Image (cartoon, helix red, strand yellow):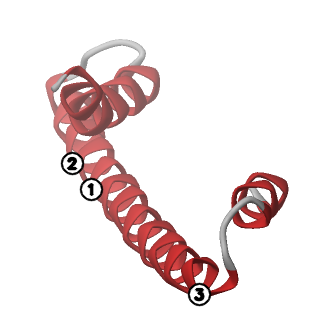
Amino acid sequence: GPRLRRALCSVLPPARQTEVLRAWEIAVDKTGGYIYSRGLMALVSGAAHYVLLVILGVPYAPALAVWVGLVSQFIPTIGT
């Protein structure tokens, strides 16, 4: 967070601080966009699986759909 960024920049010369802060902002923007897109894909996957599970008459369709949505989008990413 902000404290880590300040602590890191406090030990750097002023010229390097600007470069580090710029790289930090780029990393935060890219990571945030990636997590947002994975969350959106998890929502779409969960909704599609929910519809399919309800049509098939599977019990606990909402819980299973949430599980499938989250696992299908986040676990493969963490495991690589």
Mark 2 or 3: the one toward you = 3
**Cα distance, mark 2 to mark 3?**
51 Å
Q: Which circle's residue, 1 or 3, is located before the other in the chain?
A: 3
Give the quarter of the figure containing the N terminus: bottom right
Query: Where 46 falls versus 53 (above or below)?
Result: below
Q: Earlier in the sequence, mark 2 or mark 1?
A: 1
Mark toward the start of the polypeptide (2 vs 3): 3
The location of residue 76, given as percent across then percent down, is: 18, 28
| In-image side of 53 versus 15 (left or right) | left
Q: CA distance from mark 2 to mark 1?
A: 11 Å
Name the residue that disc number 1 marks. 41
Residue 23 image offset from top left, x and y in percent: 45, 75
Q: To which residue does mark 2 refer?
A: 48
Label 2 sits on a secondary structure element that is helix
Question: Which residue is at 15% across, 25% downward?
Answer: 56
Whether label 2 touches label 1, CB < 8 Å: no
Residue type, mark 1 in image: Met
Instruction: From the viewer's side, name the closer residue of 56 and 46.
Output: 46
Q: Amino acid at mark 2?
A: Ala
Instruction: Measure the C-alpha gap from mark 1 to mark 3.
Output: 40 Å
Is disc 3 surrounded by few (<14), some (14 to 19) or many (20+) residues within 10 Å?
A: few
For disc 3, the marked residue is: 15
Q: Residue sitting at 75 percent across and 52 percent down?
A: 4
Asked whether, in this view, residue 20 is left or right of residue 77, the answer is: right
